[in-house]
Image: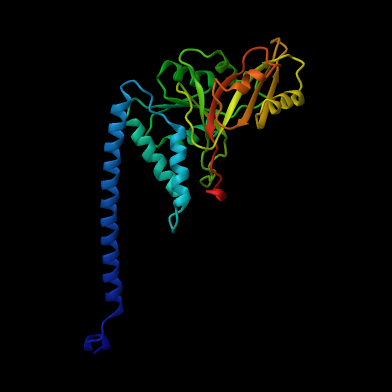
Amino acid sequence: MSSTSLGNPDPTDDAAAMLVGLRAEIDRLDDAIHDLLMARAEVVAQVSAQGGKGRVALRPGREAGILRRLLRRHQGHLPRRAVVRVWRELLAATTSMQGAYAITACEAEPGNGYAQCAREHFGALTPLHVHRSPAQAIAEVGAGTATAAVLPLPTEEEAQPWWTTLLHRADPRIHVVARLPFWSSRAEGARRVQALVVAAVPPDRSGEDRSLIALELPPEQSRARLAAALAASGFVLGQTLLRRDPRVPVAQALVDVAGFVTDDDPRLATLADALRPPVVLGAYAVPVEEDNA
């Protein structure tokens, strides 16, 4: 007869009992999380009712602030990237509760990563329309058939830069409202693309933002002179795109500056070299770098 049959407990029985208890605790926590999710959805429904019908519920700045706050307080074994994924899906779901919600993405070459970038940010179940050109994607936002468009980050090499269409302030006015990916960590095998998001709503503050300003300048304007003028006006300058097209009698510049800049910012009026009033194309929450999250 074995020693366990003489009254000595089998340690495997204790381990099995502990495992049963731990799984029961996970079930209890799942129920508690589910209760909180349902309670959160009720509050979102109340927010939606206060906002009124027809309102675009997209608030990228607020969403960025929520994620930054959660990442600052996060600790323990759950990976931070999992926190971002869970809340991105949650934010997409609750945004869709508040009205029609669809996203469009420009993917000039199939599989170049912009559709996947849009999916990661706006949710796996959010309707996604993919177009071959930025103009088609922007047109959907203007027509109201898409809430936002995910577009390639502008470069100086573009023959027809999409951002120049936002200079005209058409109705509805379309703004840059976000930069993607917001979370720098990428899934294994994912394409590393950089994108801007445009929508027919003004951007909202996240607490740590950058803004995009477009200017029309004399064709001989130098990059150094533009940078000096912006600095003299009090802007902290980041990347600058300066575009000269022989078919256009002006130079066009897109500048990325620190902070949240609005149309009534008095610094804009001090840019004397501008041939017309500068246009604030929008703003975006500064993406979270993985090491600083």
In front: 199, or 27?
199
Taking the image as shown, residue 14 lies to the left or right of residue 287, namely left
Q: Quadrant of the N terminus?
A: bottom left
Could one spot residue 111 in this view of the protein?
no
Dividing the picture into quadrants, the one containing residue 147 is top left
Write the residue at 56% across / 45% down.
289
As drawn, 79 above or below 66? below
Residue 31 position, x and y percent, is 25, 51
In front: 191, or 267?
267
Could one spot residue 208 in this view of the protein?
yes
In front: 153, or 217?
217
As drawn, 271 above or below 71? above
Taking the image as shown, residue 92 lies to the left or right of residue 21, namely right
Taking the image as shown, residue 133 lies to the left or right of residue 44, namely right
In front: 168, or 278?
278
Write the residue at 77% across / 16% down.
220
Write the residue at 66% across / 31% down.
239
